[in-house]
Image (cartoon, grey):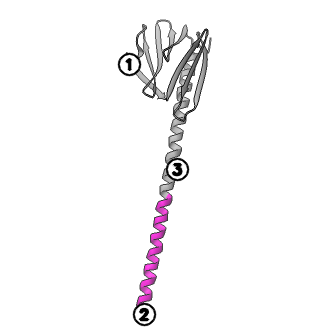
Amino acid sequence: MMRRAGAWNGLYTLFLYGLFAFFSLVLVLLGVNAYHGIVSQSDQIGQSRTAFLYIQHKLEGRLDRVEGQEDTLILIDGSMITYIFEQDGMLYEAAAMEETDPRRLQKDAIARVDAFHIEHDSDLITISFLDELGNRKVIYSTERGIGS
Protein backbone atom coordinates (compact mmCIF):
# COMPACT_ATOMS: atom_id res chain seq x y z
CA MET A 1 0.00 0.00 0.00
CA MET A 2 2.87 2.37 0.84
CA ARG A 3 4.48 1.66 -2.51
CA ARG A 4 1.31 2.60 -4.34
CA ALA A 5 0.96 5.90 -2.39
CA GLY A 6 4.65 6.68 -3.03
CA ALA A 7 4.20 6.04 -6.76
CA TRP A 8 1.18 8.33 -6.88
CA ASN A 9 3.08 11.04 -4.99
CA GLY A 10 5.96 10.74 -7.48
CA LEU A 11 3.58 10.94 -10.45
CA TYR A 12 1.77 13.89 -8.88
CA THR A 13 5.09 15.71 -8.34
CA LEU A 14 6.16 14.93 -11.91
CA PHE A 15 2.80 16.19 -13.18
CA LEU A 16 3.22 19.48 -11.27
CA TYR A 17 6.73 19.96 -12.69
CA GLY A 18 5.42 19.24 -16.18
CA LEU A 19 2.56 21.71 -15.72
CA PHE A 20 5.01 24.33 -14.47
CA ALA A 21 7.28 23.75 -17.48
CA PHE A 22 4.33 23.97 -19.89
CA PHE A 23 3.05 27.27 -18.51
CA SER A 24 6.60 28.64 -18.38
CA LEU A 25 6.97 27.83 -22.07
CA VAL A 26 3.63 29.49 -22.86
CA LEU A 27 4.68 32.60 -20.93
CA VAL A 28 8.01 32.77 -22.79
CA LEU A 29 6.25 32.41 -26.16
CA LEU A 30 3.81 35.21 -25.28
CA GLY A 31 6.77 37.41 -24.31
CA VAL A 32 8.55 36.66 -27.59
CA ASN A 33 5.42 37.59 -29.55
CA ALA A 34 5.04 40.88 -27.65
CA TYR A 35 8.73 41.68 -28.13
CA HIS A 36 8.48 40.97 -31.86
CA GLY A 37 5.50 43.35 -32.15
CA ILE A 38 7.30 46.13 -30.30
CA VAL A 39 10.48 45.79 -32.37
CA SER A 40 8.52 45.66 -35.64
CA GLN A 41 6.53 48.80 -34.82
CA SER A 42 9.67 50.57 -33.63
CA ASP A 43 11.37 49.74 -36.95
CA GLN A 44 8.41 51.08 -38.91
CA ILE A 45 8.40 54.32 -36.91
CA GLY A 46 12.17 54.62 -37.43
CA GLN A 47 11.78 54.20 -41.20
CA SER A 48 9.13 56.94 -41.30
CA ARG A 49 11.23 59.32 -39.22
CA THR A 50 14.32 58.61 -41.33
CA ALA A 51 12.51 59.43 -44.57
CA PHE A 52 10.98 62.62 -43.15
CA LEU A 53 14.22 63.95 -41.63
CA TYR A 54 16.29 63.00 -44.68
CA ILE A 55 14.07 64.97 -47.06
CA GLN A 56 13.80 67.89 -44.64
CA HIS A 57 17.58 68.02 -44.24
CA LYS A 58 18.09 67.97 -48.02
CA LEU A 59 15.61 70.83 -48.45
CA GLU A 60 17.29 72.95 -45.76
CA GLY A 61 20.55 73.02 -47.71
CA ARG A 62 21.44 75.86 -50.03
CA LEU A 63 19.76 74.87 -53.26
CA ASP A 64 19.45 76.76 -56.52
CA ARG A 65 16.08 75.21 -57.29
CA VAL A 66 13.62 72.58 -56.09
CA GLU A 67 11.25 70.90 -58.52
CA GLY A 68 8.71 68.15 -58.39
CA GLN A 69 7.67 66.09 -61.36
CA GLU A 70 6.12 62.66 -61.78
CA ASP A 71 6.43 61.90 -58.06
CA THR A 72 10.14 62.66 -58.11
CA LEU A 73 11.68 65.40 -55.99
CA ILE A 74 14.44 67.16 -57.93
CA LEU A 75 17.01 69.20 -56.01
CA ILE A 76 19.33 71.36 -58.12
CA ASP A 77 22.52 72.75 -56.62
CA GLY A 78 24.81 74.21 -59.29
CA SER A 79 25.51 71.46 -61.79
CA MET A 80 24.56 68.66 -59.35
CA ILE A 81 21.03 67.28 -59.63
CA THR A 82 19.70 65.05 -56.85
CA TYR A 83 16.57 62.96 -57.40
CA ILE A 84 14.49 61.53 -54.56
CA PHE A 85 11.82 59.06 -55.60
CA GLU A 86 9.89 55.97 -54.52
CA GLN A 87 10.24 52.64 -56.27
CA ASP A 88 8.78 49.32 -55.09
CA GLY A 89 8.05 50.57 -51.57
CA MET A 90 11.50 52.06 -51.02
CA LEU A 91 12.53 55.72 -51.09
CA TYR A 92 15.73 56.24 -53.11
CA GLU A 93 18.19 59.01 -53.85
CA ALA A 94 20.19 59.30 -57.06
CA ALA A 95 22.54 62.07 -58.18
CA ALA A 96 23.78 63.15 -61.60
CA MET A 97 25.52 66.04 -63.30
CA GLU A 98 22.79 66.37 -65.95
CA GLU A 99 19.07 65.73 -66.19
CA THR A 100 18.30 62.07 -66.80
CA ASP A 101 15.89 59.34 -65.75
CA PRO A 102 16.75 58.77 -62.06
CA ARG A 103 15.68 55.12 -62.20
CA ARG A 104 18.58 54.42 -64.57
CA LEU A 105 21.18 55.91 -62.21
CA GLN A 106 23.01 54.26 -59.34
CA LYS A 107 20.65 54.83 -56.43
CA ASP A 108 20.94 54.67 -52.66
CA ALA A 109 18.09 53.45 -50.49
CA ILE A 110 16.85 55.90 -47.87
CA ALA A 111 13.89 54.23 -46.14
CA ARG A 112 10.78 52.12 -46.72
CA VAL A 113 7.61 54.05 -47.59
CA ASP A 114 4.26 52.95 -49.01
CA ALA A 115 3.66 56.01 -51.22
CA PHE A 116 5.53 59.17 -52.23
CA HIS A 117 3.82 62.09 -53.94
CA ILE A 118 4.86 65.58 -55.08
CA GLU A 119 2.39 68.39 -55.76
CA HIS A 120 3.64 71.56 -57.41
CA ASP A 121 1.40 74.63 -57.10
CA SER A 122 2.99 77.87 -58.37
CA ASP A 123 5.84 78.53 -55.86
CA LEU A 124 4.77 75.92 -53.25
CA ILE A 125 5.87 72.29 -53.44
CA THR A 126 4.07 69.77 -51.23
CA ILE A 127 5.96 66.57 -50.56
CA SER A 128 3.93 63.82 -48.93
CA PHE A 129 4.52 60.18 -48.22
CA LEU A 130 2.67 57.38 -46.53
CA ASP A 131 4.63 55.25 -44.09
CA GLU A 132 4.16 51.55 -43.39
CA LEU A 133 1.84 52.30 -40.46
CA GLY A 134 -0.50 54.32 -42.70
CA ASN A 135 0.59 57.71 -41.34
CA ARG A 136 0.82 60.53 -43.87
CA LYS A 137 3.80 62.89 -43.51
CA VAL A 138 3.86 66.23 -45.34
CA ILE A 139 6.69 68.69 -45.98
CA TYR A 140 6.10 72.06 -47.62
CA SER A 141 8.83 73.81 -49.58
CA THR A 142 9.26 76.69 -51.97
CA GLU A 143 11.14 76.33 -55.24
CA ARG A 144 14.24 77.57 -53.38
CA GLY A 145 14.06 74.97 -50.55
CA ILE A 146 13.08 75.34 -46.90
CA GLY A 147 16.18 77.28 -45.84
CA SER A 148 15.85 79.96 -48.54
In three-dimensional space, the C-alpha distance between marks 1 and 3, rounded to whole angstroms, equals 39 Å
Where is 13 relative to 75, above or below? below
Where is 52 relative to 66, above or below? below
Closer to viewer: mark 1 or mark 3: 3
Compare marks 1 and 3 and give the one earlier in the sequence.
Answer: 3
Evaluate if marks 1 and 3 touch, with contact meaning CB atoms under 8 Å apart.
Answer: no
Label for residue 34? 3
In the rendered view, does 95 fall on the left or right side of 65?
Answer: left
Q: Nearer the viewer, residue 46 or 128?
A: 128
Compare marks 2 and 3 and give the one earlier in the sequence.
Answer: 2
Query: Can you identify the residue that label 1 sits on?
Result: 106
Residue shown at the point (41%, 89%) measured from the top left: 4
Residue shown at the point (60%, 15%) measured from the top left: 141
Classed neighbour count for the residue bearing mark 2: other residues with Cα under 10 Å, few (<14), some (14–19), many (≥20): few
Amino acid of disc 1 = Gln
In three-dimensional space, the C-alpha distance between marks 1 and 2, rounded to whole angstroms, equals 84 Å
| Residue 20 covered by magenta stretch | yes
Question: Where residue 146 sits: x, y (%)?
Answer: 61, 15
| SS class, disc 2 | loop
Residue range of the region highlighted in magenta in the rendering: 2-27
Label for residue 1? 2
Amino acid of disc 3 = Ala
Residue shown at the point (51%, 23%) measured from the top left: 116
Amino acid of disc 2 = Met
Compare marks 1 and 2 and give the one earlier in the sequence.
Answer: 2
